[in-house]
Amino acid sequence: MKKAVSLFLAVLMLVAIGVSASAVDLQMSFGGSSSGGMMYYMAGAFADTITPLVDGVNITNVTSGAAVDNAIKTATGEFDLALTYGAIVYEAATGTGNFENNQYTDQAQNIKGIAKGYDSDFYFVSLAKSNITSLSDLNGKTVACGNAGSGTQYVADIVLDVFGIDCKREYISFSDGAAAMKEGRVDAVCQSGSPSGALTELAATDSIVIIPFTEEEIDQLVAAYPWFFSNYMSKDTYQGMTEDVLLPNFTVYVICNSNVPDDVMYKIMEAIYQPGVIETLGTGHKNWLQFVEDSEAFESLGLEIHPGVKSFYADHPEYCAN
């Protein structure tokens, strides 16, 4: 009898363990960027904030090559969640650019939209002592353009090509780029999004310059790539700035893989919109404060919003922009 009871209790324990494991073992990856990049901090803030609010889900911040790499790995299913540029969403939908006639073309439709993450600025940074204060000053210099395959590299190549800037392009991580500029191995670095952790640290010890764009330069860039628009970086962004700086901007989206279960995405959306949660995300990185429903604009790029997200916004129209 005792043996039978012991065996029964053992079976109950195994069942309980199995149920508990299945209840908490949905592991989800969030693709951000390399260490020191803005998306790295945003992905970390999301994982730390949302995981405790969604039963059965563990979200992990995964380092990546940033926007381009994030879109590709979301398409292939390596990433469940990620941040990427609207321009790259358009490429995925149309089979152009990074999704043109390659192994990722047929997987692009696996990318689904969640919401607008934020509007990102793009900029070049130099040390004040270098006397590099305009785009034309970059000619003949060495510029750190972000990791190869990153969104920053993608935009940097576009901008440098549009203006015909003849410089040596180094494709290294954000933290390595900032360190290389401090040590004099590169003359300038470029960055998408602000503030960047690596540049914030650099500005605390060295005087930096955010290189401004002129209105004519913005117009020239928009004429070539209409998804750019202009905006100002606040003088409060980095230590030592004395005035707002005119820069090109573009939209960044939060995306997911189509295989993320509908009910899981619904629960994640519920967690995001709990009172105070977006503000908490904003303490991890201020760009999360821009998180907003933007389904119509996303789908106009050619891909669909995730069904779980659609259901959430249908049930909660008070969170919709329109």
Image (tube, rainbow, N blue to C red):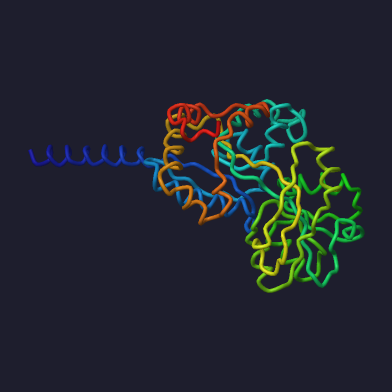
Lateral position of residue 126 relative to residue 104, left or right:
right
> Looking at the picture, how far across and down is residue 175, in whole percent?
68, 61
Lateral position of residue 56 relative to residue 247, left or right:
left
**Which residue is pictured at 72% across the width and 59% down the height?**
244
The answer to whether residue 66 is visible is yes
Lateral position of residue 185 relative to residue 174, left or right:
right
State which quadrant residue 82 falls in: top right
Q: Nearer the viewer, residue 86 or 96?
A: 86
**Which residue is pictured at 38% across the width and 40% down the height?**
56
State which quadrant residue 238 falls in: bottom right
Lateral position of residue 258 relative to residue 171, left or right:
left
> Looking at the picture, how far across and down is residue 57, in whole percent?
42, 41
Q: Nearer the viewer, residue 55 or 313?
A: 313
Q: Nearer the viewer, residue 109 or 106?
A: 109
Q: Is residue 163 above or below residue 103?
A: below
> Looking at the picture, how far across and down is residue 293, in whole percent?
55, 35
The answer to whether residue 78 is visible is no
> Looking at the picture, how far across and down is residue 208, in whole percent?
74, 67
Q: Is residue 216 above or below residue 11?
A: below
